[in-house]
Image (cartoon, rainbow, N blue to C red):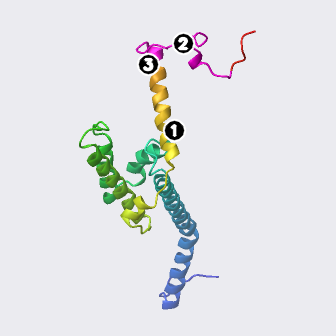
Amino acid sequence: MNFDFQQPLTIADLINAAVLIATIAAIIFGPIFALRISRKQQYLAEKRRRQLEIFTTLIRTRRAELSPDRVMALNSIPVEFYNIEKITTAHENYVKQLNANFPAPDAPNADVFHKELSDLMYDLLYAVGRHLDFHFDKRDLEKFSYSPMGWSNDESEQRKLRRALLDIMTGSRPLTVTNVENQPHLRSDKFPPKP
């Protein structure tokens, strides 16, 4: 094949050259672009998976305020929902209320405080749900959640027992020991009689 560079290029020659350059570019850059697109899709899918995990954790634990999973999910929101203004604002409002001084249970404003805290939590759940294409009603999120009363009672009893044990161990409360042998009303039939 001889090339005669003295003859002018025809349109067919220019088209062939353009096709050749396009083919070479596609061979070189095609896999690079495909890899970039694939990695971007994987990144977005993984990000959505993490966001869904946070959302489902918050939904599961919405009546378990002291759950470690809930605390970890709340602390992950600023990273996983970075630059999503509605969510970051709802999160900031909720955390600000969580970090406020809780009123004593018998304080006159305790109910208002806890209602506001609950409303802020459901605002956060609603914002995250909307972002992830879940269309819940805010009040349904609260209304259709369940937590057995026994869990709350158990948790309360464990806190009381822990507090009593700490008081005894630190010496701020005495450990009372009673001799039941001389006090028949305190004796139970669990012990066999003395031989």
Q: Residue at x 31, y 58 (%)?
A: 85
Which label sits on residue 5?
A: none
Placement of 14 over or under 191, stated as above or below: below
- Main SS category, magenta section: loop
Looking at the image, residue 143 sits to the left or right of residue 23; the answer is: left
Residue reaching furthest left? 108
Question: Which region is colored magenta?
Answer: 167-190
Q: Amino acid at mark 2?
A: Thr
Q: CA distance from mark 1 to mark 2?
A: 27 Å
| Residue at the disc numbered 2 | 178
| Residue at the disc numbered 3 | 167
| Residue at the disc numbered 1 | 154
Placement of 3 over or under 167, stated as above or below: below
Q: CA distance from mark 3 to mark 1?
A: 20 Å
Q: In the figure, residue 141 lies in which quadrant?
A: bottom left
Are the two marked residues, 1 and 2, in contact with CB atoms closer than 8 angstroms? no
